[in-house]
Amino acid sequence: MSTTTAKSTNGKTAESTPVLTLAIDIGGSGLKASLLDEHGEMVTDRVRADTPNPCPPPVLIDALVKLIEPLGSFDRVSVGFPGVIRKGKVITAYNLGQSDWENFDLREALATKLARPVQVKNDADVQGLGAISGVGVEMVITLGTGVGSALFDDGWIAPHIELAHHPFRKGQTYEDQLGEKALEQAGRKKWKRRVKKAINLLRRLTNFDRLYIGGGNSRLIDFTLPPDVEIISNDHGMRGGIWLWRKDRPQVVSEPAAE
Ligand code: BGC
């Protein structure tokens, strides 16, 4: 890790070591990681591996340890997880195996394994933290294996709502209609029509000022989006991890990190 020299107010120079955050994005099909500087910029290449299948906690933790090996040392860890998280514990993880994960304290397990403080938050929330401008009502959805969602008001994050498993249309949920399996079953043309419908419905539901669409399948959107809707890079799923440690956006003052 490199050090920088800063001048203190008494004119003396002091060595300060930049704090590096290991950002991990756990997805239903891929695991990604990178190191971030204090501004949330990625300072290493992004590493990626397929998500193991099946993927119970010990298997995932081993896969993460292997994944991050090339990245070098870090001071703290931010994790985006594809399910509901409360105080570092997993409440739901439908795309990883609900019965394996329910109540698992991922924050504690990773803090023990990596010997660093750890924050864990829902993956769409983390992606949103990376993408939003902090002005107005901003919504983020992610279209990948599952369907992620996060909502913000002037940068404040709303309590996490699982849009994925909420009714959308024809007796099916957003994930039933827009998740990876639905894309495979219905084909791109139908899937894109559903995306358009979802945008209209979410506009009525939240009156968003801006909607961001991320996730691996967002790249399939080739129709013209309304001016207040944009596709975002998946790198926000890692870059957003910096906000789990920053106190200059109010929502981020989260639970104390497990050490
Ligand atoms: C989960 C969400 C998650 C989304 C994207 C859904 O199945 O329920 O919590 O954000 O997938 O990974």
Image (cartoon, rainbow, N blue to C red):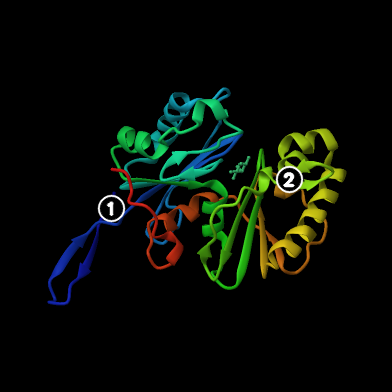
Rendering coords of residue 114 (x, y %) = 32, 36
**Tag on residue 174?**
2
**Can you say whether 184 is above or below 56 in the image?**
below
Which residue is nearer to you in this view: 42 or 83?
A: 83
Specify few, some or many for label 2: CA neighbours under 10 Å numbering under 14, 14-19, or 20 or more: many
Left or right of 165, for residue 245: left
Residue at which label 1 appears: 2
| Left or right: where 208 falls relative to 63 | right
Image height of 65 relative to 121, above or below:
above
Give 125 or 220, whichever is nearer the viewer: 125
Image quarter where the C terminus lies is top left
The front one of 163 and 1 is 163
- Residue at 32%, 42% (x, y): give it: 73
Q: Residues within 10 Å of mark 1 (few under 14, many from 20)?
A: few
Q: Look at label 1 and name its amino acid.
A: Ser
Could you tell me residue 167's position as x and y percent? Answer: 74, 46
Instruction: Name the element at disc 2.
Output: helix
Residue 67: % across, % down: 45, 33
Residue at image coords 46%, 45%: 86
Q: Earlier in the sequence, mark 1 or mark 2?
A: 1
Q: Is residue 2 left or right of residue 130?
A: left
User: Relative to 199, does residue 170 appear above or below in the rendering?
Assistant: above
